[in-house]
Image (cartoon, coloured by chain):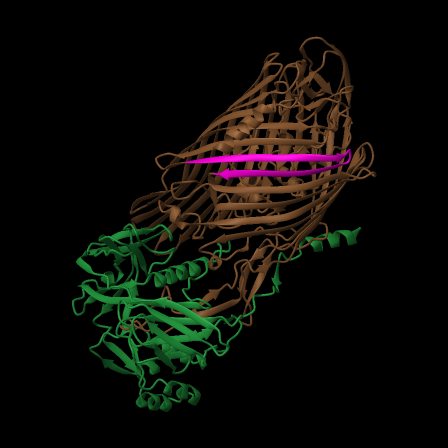
Amino acid sequence: MNRIYILLLLFLVVSCTKDLELSYEKPDQTMVVNCLFSENEAWKVTLTRVKSYRDQSDTYVDDARVLIVPENNDTIHLVYFKDGIYGSDEKPIIGIQYRLIIRDSKGKTTTATNSIPAKPTISEITPSSQKTTYFSNANLSDYMVMAVDFKIKGTDQPNFVRFRLSTFNTKWGYLRYMVTKETISALREKKFPEDYLNELEKLIGVSMSSYNYWGIIQNIAKKYELPYNGDITSSLKEIKVSTRYDDSLLTSTIFSNSIGFINVSKDIWNVLGEFRDEKEVSLFVSYIPVINKGSQTNFKEEYWLEVTGMSEDYYKYQKSYIKQVNNLDNPFASVIEVYSNLTNGVGIFAGYNRQMIHYHDY
Amino acid sequence: MRLNLFLILLLLGFSAFAQQRRTVSGYIADAQTGERLYAASVYEQNSGIGTISNRFGFFSILLSEGKAVLKFSFVGYQLQSKQIDLHADTLINISLKSDNKLDEVIVKGKLNNQLADNSNLGHHKLSAKKLARLPSLMGEKDVMKSLMILPGVQQGSEGSAGIFVRGGSPDQNLILLDDVPLYNVSHLFGFVSVFTPEAINSIDFYKGGFPARYGGRLSSVIDLRMKDGNKFKRETSINLGLISSQFTTEGPIKKGESSYFFSVRRTLLDLIFKGVAKVAQRNMEEQAIPSYGFYDINGKINFRLNEKNHLYWSFYSGKDNLSFEYSDHLKSTEKEETQKTSGALNWGHVMTALKLNSQLNSKLFVNTTLSGSIFNYGNLFKANTETSVGSDVSKSDFRLEYQSQIRSIALKTDIDIYGNSNLPFQIGLFANVNNYLPGKQKVARNEGTDENSSGEISSLDYGVYLDKKITLGDKLSFTVGLRNAFYSIRNQKTYFAAEPRFSMTFRSNENTSYQASFAKMTQAIHLLSNGNVGLPTDIWVPSTKLIRPETSDIFSVGMKKTIPSGIKLSMEAYYKRLNHVISFTEGDGILDVDQNWEQKITVGKGRAWGLETEARYSNSKLEGWMGYTLAWNDRKFDDINKGRWFPYQYDRRHKFDLGIIMKLNNDWSASATLTYQSGAPATYSGLDYSGFPNNLNNETTDFFTGKPINSDRIQYYPTINGVRLPAYHRFDIGFTKEWERYGKKKALSLSVYNVYSRQNPFMVYAKTKADGTIGLKQFSLFPVIPSISYRISF
């Protein structure tokens, strides 16, 4: 009788989870194309292949024939550089339809067509300094924001646009750090391991922003199990520059409650919109930099609005990607396929037209 | 419209060729309880003329003047004969005695040759008796789960009471309780249906060949009748189970004429959860108290107004409530903080129906139903924090309320006109007013209050149906029907749907029949669902100007044969075409309904086809069945799977069922069921590719040049639902002892669910393994589960 009880107990405590070995879809050598093109940027197309999560190897495609066919001009033959990148000195022109044709070594052809959309016309930008609260329905959270209102001009075609916000701190943004030979010598004198110094030497001459240099240096130190040491950071060279490097601009939260302009899913970094007629748009941008600045007067917080005119394909591509990422942590949600405009491939071949608008300083 | 006129003329025409004779009409009821019997047969021995009783036990048969021998029968009841000398229209009420034998699932009244196989292909009838003998999960007999043993009916996730019929989704099942549609019929997140088995008298299940009186859903009809209550004797029963307990009482108001029925079922889980949590945490600063409970109340009263008029009043109310309370108290030298958080999720139905049966004359029976129902889903979340620093006290309050609701009022009249035929010409009129509130949310914080609502949408559905069974000689019979419905969405659009129904039966001999049917169905209500778990958070929305009603065309052909050993074989092939089906593409979760919800929907089509076979045997001590279904079920949406067909989430290639119910002796009966179905399709590719769609939290492109500087990994799915999860199979056994002592009826049920503890997949999710690779983990719910329940009636 006892055996029966033991068996019964064993059944009941059987773990309710187990690993599954499903017959995954095999990597099918699908061509992956990445080409987001804009005015004044030479053609660059990156080709890779779909691969398994478990596959850590590179899947660059280096033997394809890549052509760009403008609707009214001669075909552009792209040449292979490295790491799956094919390029040309020629630059796309706004309004022209371009057809991408890729023939791989097995004769399979991948194609897509797209063009650069018109630059969105923004006018009557009215920033506010008033702090307010924006409640995100998707995140069920309050964000400290301030409004910026403007008009966006309509056209006789559907328009797709993305807004993002960046801030630039004139005190820290112009400050950069660099590893120099002197840095290495100083650390060697302090008996830092040679392996570590050899790794650090690779960074000589690399200009790092004041926001991320510490993280980069610490990551290398961590790799060699070195505890935090002020000697490392103090040995770096501090440089003052007059250029706003991209890594010194901080992306900030941005929201919209204007009809047709949305934050997709739980995303708080992009406002995407579709419109045809002229629109009045209200965006709500982060107030945190203003708080951090407080009453200090020795620097400014510059507010930059990034306004990108997107082709419809690019718009769908980004929107679906945001949805995919947001759904990954929801076991009940259906999977989201990221949009692609490629025939016989995945990825994107799409034009965009971006402008940076420095609209206010705080 | 021409087709409609033709069908009406056809229906009326076939009723007009009969001779002048005498009518015998009346009601057939259970002798012990007075419950009226639906589909009991009436058969005149000499002429072979017969008919069957309608849903209210009424029959009308036209016979030649003179002596007649009428035989009344119903499965599970003793045959009764009555001799009459017929010279005028006659009214007879018959009471049949139960023979206390095992009954069968498929309705096959022992009628005359014309009716021996009713031509409603895909119609199954299940009795409460049968339900009581099937093994169950944790002792909970379940109406919906009992349907899963039928071919063509599939189960959703493990334990779920949601069913999927011939490639349809759960919202495509029309579930009627005393003629009132219910929406969410699940308790405990789908593990138990809302139907208290003790309150249900009969279940009619249609998966094809739909009579024209049913409409509004695409895939199946589950028509449940509540018990009327015993008209002769008062009976009270108490049922104690592991998940819930029930109290039922019924009895006469006026003996033999009017009766009442009342039952209440309640889970005890909430008391257990709360009690255990409170005791375990009684001295803790931090407390978390969960609770879950549900209840169902069923009531019915029926009054005999006079010999020809009967009034029924039905009532149902059921609710689930899931809640938690959390509190914490933090104290340091600098500050003191008290946090209180609570949440509640509740959903449920209230419905009531008033029904008047009128026998206007021996050839005209009218049933009029006025009903109302409310389905409500809501949740409430509250968080309060009080912080004291010295003498400064600050408070933070957060309150979130969410509500989704459907309110309906319906009026319908069903008329059975017997005319000069023994088979009634059925005509009906119906009108429903529905108010939908897909979602309304209110968030209140210290900073203010935000309200967001999808807005309320009203609709009026109205129309007419006609149905007529026609016999041509002994071997051929047809049922021809037409349902015309208007779906009018207030301030938006009116859709018209003409739904022809047709079925035919050809009996080649006493034991073999061939059948075919066609039905067009329209559904003007849609379920936006994020998964297949059957959560109450799934949202019902109506058709709108932008979203057309869904439609289906269902074709089926079949054969039924009884072989000499008494085994009944059936085989049915079907093809179902679905149009304007919708899918919720966003997958953004429960609190995301707003005025733009129509933009988050993609519209597509579906197709399902398959072959269902069944062998069934029953005698007075044994009933056994074996069923196999081979099926395909696909969907196609422009925005999904690159616009190509893909297997629907409920696609199961094979389904096999084996079952037996056996009477061991006078007291004991045993049952066993084995079920197998192919694994569910799922989308897990394990593949990805690099891209630059702009990472969400980090700038990944050069700020001024736009050049990509980092790459994201994009999940790649070569095909949607391209992977199959492991197959589902399970073996259950049950024993029931029924005995009577000191005038009290007692029943003890013992069940073992999932005897060999099969780990069936409930949910599969990706998880990073120790070696950094991503693997899949399967989560299963129920290992072997023994259970016991006890019922006493007095």
Residue B318 seen in this snapshot: no
Where A29 falls versus B497 (above or below)?
below
Image quarter for residue B273? top right
Place of residue B232 in the rendered image (x, y in percent of width and height, measured from the top left): 68, 17
Asked if residue B329 is positioned above or below residue B23 in the image, the reply reads below
Residue appearing at x 30%, y 46% in the figure: B446
Between A19 and B395, the residue placed more toward the observer is A19
User: Within the image, what quadrant is residue A84 found in?
Assistant: bottom left
Residue range (magenta): B495-523
Q: Which chain is brown?
A: B
| Side of B623 relative to B715 (left or right) | right
Q: Is residue A225 left or right of residue B632?
A: left
Q: In the drawing, does residue B383 fall left or right of residue A20?
A: left
Q: List x then y, in percent, for residue B715.
A: 47, 65
Report x, y in % for residue B485. 47, 32
Q: Which chain is green?
A: A
Q: Is residue B515 magenta?
A: yes
